[in-house]
Amino acid sequence: QVQLVESGGGLVQAGGSLRLSCAASGRPSSAYYMGWFRQAPGKEREFVAAIIWSGTNTVYADSVKGRFTISRDNAKNTVYLQMNSLKPEDTAVYYCAATATRGVITGPSAYNSWGQGTQVTVSS
């Protein structure tokens, strides 16, 4: 089991940037993909981005392509989400997640390890 701890959330004005971090401990080598999801009040948890733990493959939701960048530092067992050109509709709790699946990785049900979440608020 992988333990995940997110950090880096906060309040930012529209057009600003934030970088989220996700520190993995336990058995991070058991995770094949690391993903970021977000959940706004009253909405379902939605996929944001994912990165393969041992390579360079990345996947992004259409809503964040060109604005968000997912990356990882294997030496630090940490995954990052750089968020630029933030919009008020990006406001949500952002969750880091890990999965050993090599199939579809854009749905929350594919992930079996989750962090506690970090709040991102974008003001207009």
Image (cartoon, helix red, strand yellow):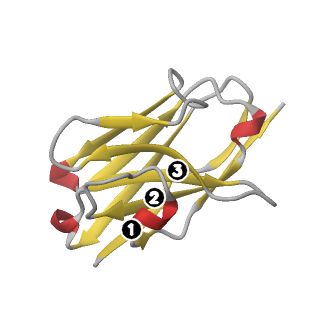
Q: Position of residue 28 (x, y in %)?
A: 22, 66
How many angstroms separate mark 1 from mark 3 (CA)? 14 Å
Secondary structure of the residue carrying numbered label 1: strand
Q: Is residue 58 above or below residue 101?
A: above
Question: Mark 2 highlights which residue?
Answer: 96
Cβ atoms under marks 1 and 3 closer than 8 Å: no
| Amino acid type, mark 3 | Gly
Give the residue at the far right of this rendering.
124
Q: Quadrant of residue 34?
A: bottom left
Residue in the image at 15% along x and 47% along y: 54
Residue in the image at 39% along x and 37% along y: 59
Q: Which mark is residue 8?
A: 3
Task: State left or right for residue 61 relative to residue 98.
Answer: right
Task: State left or right for residue 32 relative to residue 71.
Answer: left
Give the residue at the far front of this rendering.
103
How many angstroms separate mark 2 from mark 1 (CA)? 7 Å
Task: State left or right for residue 20 relative to residue 32.
Answer: right
Q: Given this view, does label 2 or label 3 mark the residue nearer the observer?
A: 2
| Label 2 or label 1, whichever comes before in sequence order | 1
Q: Given this view, does label 1 or label 3 mark the residue nearer the observer?
A: 1
Secondary structure of the residue carrying numbered label 2: strand
Q: Nearer the viewer, residue 9 or 91?
A: 91
Q: Nearer the viewer, residue 66 or 99?
A: 99
Q: Quadrant of the N terminus?
A: bottom left
Q: Position of residue 2 (x, y in %)?
A: 30, 73
Q: Quadrant of the C terminus?
A: top right
How many angstroms separate mark 2 from mark 3 (CA)? 12 Å
Cβ atoms under marks 2 and 1 closer than 8 Å: yes
